[in-house]
Image (spheres, rainbow, N blue to C red):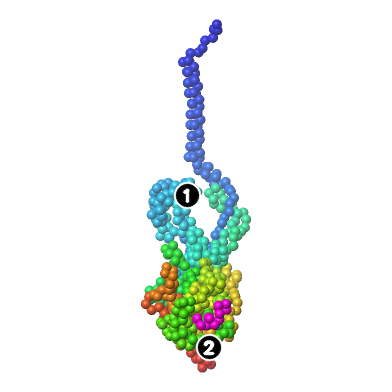
Amino acid sequence: MSNNKKPKSSSFRNVVKVRLIFVSGLLLLFAVSLIARLANLQIAQHKTLLAKSEKQPHHGNLKTYLGRGTIFDRNGNELATNLMVESVFVVPQEVRDRKYTSKVLASALGQNYDRVYKEVSSNKQFAWIKRKASTDEIIHLKKAALSGVRFRSEQKRFYPKRELAANVIGFVGTDDYGLAGIEQTYQGKLKGMVYSQPIEQDGRGRNIQNLGSLSRSNLGNYDLMLTLDEVIQFTAEYHLTKQVERYKADSGMAVVMNPNSGEIYAMANVPQFNPNNYNKFTPETRKNNTVVSSYEPGSIFKPIVAAAALDNGIAQPHDKFFCENGSFKIGGKNIGEASNHKYGSLSMQEIIAKSSNIGAIKIAQKLGKDSFYEYIRKFGFGEKTNIRLPGVSSGLLGKRKNWNERSLASISFGQEIAVTPLQMVVALSAIANGGTLMEPHIAKALMRDGKIIKEIKPKKIRRVISEKTSRQMMEILKFVVENGTGKKAAIDGFEVAGKTGTAQKYITETQSYSKTEFISSFIGYAPADNPRLAILVMIDNPKGRHWGGVVAAPVFVKIVEKSLRHLNVTSRKERIFILDRA
């Protein structure tokens, strides 16, 4: 029997307790020492350590941003430039009172409080609150002197002429990226240029010394000169707006082009918008309808069938066509004349001057479906114009194989085909300039530091009609203004060639043409014998009077008169006066 005795349970527990107290004491002593050390680092030695860290150099890159390129009109007038503004951001770790700071920021900047508070309370190194704030907003916040709120100077796109050519120029977003118009299509050329330079900085990001030379990280920063003329653009917009308001129309468009070079002098859209506050306007208002939207042209398309017939040699200006006394059945349906006119035999010249629908059909029938289609394509319809603008439409032209019995007839007087206003002006310019289709362009030159880097030159696409046909068409279109439906387009001292149009609007819901809604238009060029301007004016859904010769032609006249004076084109009277004094 063993003599060993087991220890009493109470003694064992006492030993364990002593050991636990000893270990706990050691842990507590370590924790107190650690806290004391951290407190010493955070408080007592804060300034010393901060000074050391600030002296500790590190390498980085200094980025320099050269602002977005300026957009000029053809005469050097600024249409889009840059202003220096300030943006607001926060350094969340430096904000003392997050709720108060968020409240002041949201109120001063017109921002949502919850969004601001989320940014102020984040773990980010910095957070934008509002980019490119107004001067009043910045002044208010600087007076508030909020901890953690900082300001950064940035460039903001500014359009000094406000609504002028806004639908053409477009606008940029907060990050200066082009979102519409010229700003969008020339983004790669206009975008600001970023230069990068290796540098040495202290712990607070302050520059100590440069370590290398500047390097360009991307291409851009060109200035852009447009073909637009500020005076002609303003004239077109002003008179178009007055006429749209006078007739309570839905909208209006005008295109002014140099028929010899394809340079666009003006593209007017009504209603207008201010690109400085583009987000306050609807996308529909911001559209450039002269290139984006297509319309059935109506009677302004009749010169196309006439030019095709003359050039093809199947008819001459004074050849007669029987116009069926005002009623012509095709495909089981009767086609009549505007205002129920009952024409008998008319010459081609008279058909265009009186705007006879049946006469246009007779010319097209003699020309034939195949030839007519080919000339329509040669004039540029059914394809994009290649102008460098976003959203350019090709219009609508059915394939020749899909034309039915009525297609040839309908297209001859501008139905069953849709064209953009620019397409129509480009086609008329080919008639005006001797027969050559020119590519329209809106940019004139790329520039840098006031010097032209690249000039955009006129481009011929193809010959459409002969010079003889061009001269014959000039006489026919002059006759329209002197003796036909275009009398209100006559201008004292200048010969004008042109054509009126009054197109019934097609109603998709009823699949029929409206008897109350029209597009009134006038297209023409001047001076007729030496064209400097080709112009189309279209007014959508005027109320009351709706004839193109009444509603659109007067706007054409105002644009021509002002533009020719601006371009120093002398009238016949002035030329005679100069010759008499010589």
Residue lying furthest top in this view? Answer: 1
Q: Is residue 102 left or right of residue 59?
A: left
At a point 51% along the width and 76% down the height, the residue shown is 405
Packing grade of label 1 (10 A; few <14, some 14-19, many >=20) is many
Asked if labels 1 and 2 touch by Cβ distance under 8 angstroms, the answer is no
User: For the residue marked with disc 1, what is the amino acid?
Assistant: Val
Secondary structure mostly taken by the magenta-highlighted segment of the chain: helix
- The structure residue drawn at horizontal position 54% and vertical position 51%, both measured from the top left corner, is 206
> Image height check: is 125 above or below 331?
above
Task: Residue under label 1, please give it.
Answer: 91
Q: Magenta segment: does it hold 334?
A: no
- First-in-chain label (2 vs 1): 1
Question: Furthest-right residue in view?
Answer: 212
Residue closest to the eye, 436 or 199: 436
Relative to 176, say whether 525 is above or below.
below
Q: Nearer the viewer, residue 386 or 563?
A: 386
Looking at numbered disc 2 in the image, what kind of residue is underneath it? Asp
User: Residue 164 placed where, x, y %?
Assistant: 46, 71
Look at the image and tell me whether residue 433 can be seen.
no
- The secondary element bearing badge 2 is classed as loop
Q: Is residue 364 magenta?
A: yes
User: The magenta stretch spans which residues?
Assistant: 360-372
In this rendering, the label closer to the viewer, 2 or 1: 2
- Can I make out residue 347 in this image? yes
Secondary structure of the residue carrying tag 1 is loop
The residue that mark 2 highlights is 319
